[in-house]
Image (cartoon, helix red, strand yellow):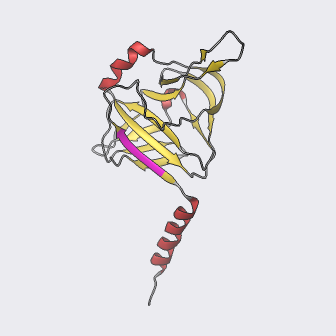
């Protein structure tokens, strides 16, 4: 049996990816109500940010999201332990397969403003909300545990199967369903 260098290289790459356990899935999230989230949703919640101001959608504004397309990115087993968010989500790009047009998200489902559960200082519960691209950040670092599964749901003006999604220096994938 004759094995070429190409075959060996391909086998090594496939074996490497299998050993690392890397999983990336990207799909269009179809829903009638953007205020109801998937049950198994796990949004990164370990982050640090210098001089940041956030802008979250209010509950009554969520119904206006129907004019956007939601893209659901799920990942785990990555070797990186962090990624960054930039102003206006400039480092998150969707590249249209039809014309290579680059779009950035209008909003990202994120751990938002906290709600107090009592009068005890520090006693609060996080609220999952849509953070819009109208925020200002300086060094917004999101830490992840490599073996843990995470989800990001992003709202774009348009998106379809076959478009590319890139989180700068972190993930590059295709929308597959």
Label total for image: 0
Does residue 56 lie above or below 176 as drawn? above
Q: Position of residue 164 (x, y in %)?
A: 38, 46
Specify whether 8 is left or right of 71: right
Please tell me whether residue 25 is drawn above or below residue 70 in the rendered image: below
The residue under the point 61% across, 52% down is: 79
Q: Residue furthest right?
A: 121
| Side of 66 where 125 appears, left or right | right
Instruction: Residue 88 in the image: state x and y as whole percent.
Output: 49, 27
Q: Position of residue 176 (x, y in %)?
A: 35, 49
Where, quadrant-wise, is the N terminus in this rendering? bottom left
> Residue, x 59% and y 18% (percent of image)?
114
Q: Nearer the viewer, residue 31 or 161?
A: 31
Q: Nearer the viewer, residue 102 or 26?
A: 26
What residue is at 33 percent from the left and 43 percent from the top? 100
Residue farthest along the bottom direction in this orientation = 1
Instruction: Look at 30% across and 41% down and name the residue there.
Output: 160
Q: Which residues are magenta?
A: 24-28
Q: Is residue 25 magenta?
A: yes
State whether the magenta stretch is mostly helix, strand or loop.
strand
**In the orientation shown, which residue stands out farthest toward the top?**
119
In reply to whether residue 98 is colored magenta, the answer given is no
* Horizontal and vertical percent position of residue 112: 55, 22
- Residue 32 versus residue 104: which sits nearer the camera? 32
In this view, the residue farthest toward the left is 98
Question: Would you say 52 lies left or right of 41 here?
Answer: right
């Amino acid at each position: 049996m004759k094995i070429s260098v190409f075959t060996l290289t391909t086998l090594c790459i496939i074996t490497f990816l299998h050993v690392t356990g890397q999983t990336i899935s990207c799909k269009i999230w179809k829903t009638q109500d953007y205020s109801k989230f998937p049950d198994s949703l796990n949004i990164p919640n370990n982050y640090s940010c210098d001089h940041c101001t956030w802008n979250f959608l209010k509950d009554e504004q969520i119904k206006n999201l129907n004019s956007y397309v939601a893209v659901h990115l799920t990942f785990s087993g990555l070797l990186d332990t962090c990624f960054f968010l930039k102003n206006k989500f400039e480092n998150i790009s969707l590249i249209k397969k039809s014309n290579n047009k680059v779009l950035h998200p209008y909003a990202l489902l994120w751990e938002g403003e906290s709600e107090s559960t009592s009068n005890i200082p520090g006693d609060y519960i996080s609220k999952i909300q849509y953070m819009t691209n109208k925020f200002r950040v300086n060094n917004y670092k999101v830490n992840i545990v490599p073996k843990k599964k995470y989800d990001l749901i992003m709202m774009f003006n348009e998106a379809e199967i076959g478009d590319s999604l890139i989180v700068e220096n972190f993930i590059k994938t295709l929308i597959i369903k």
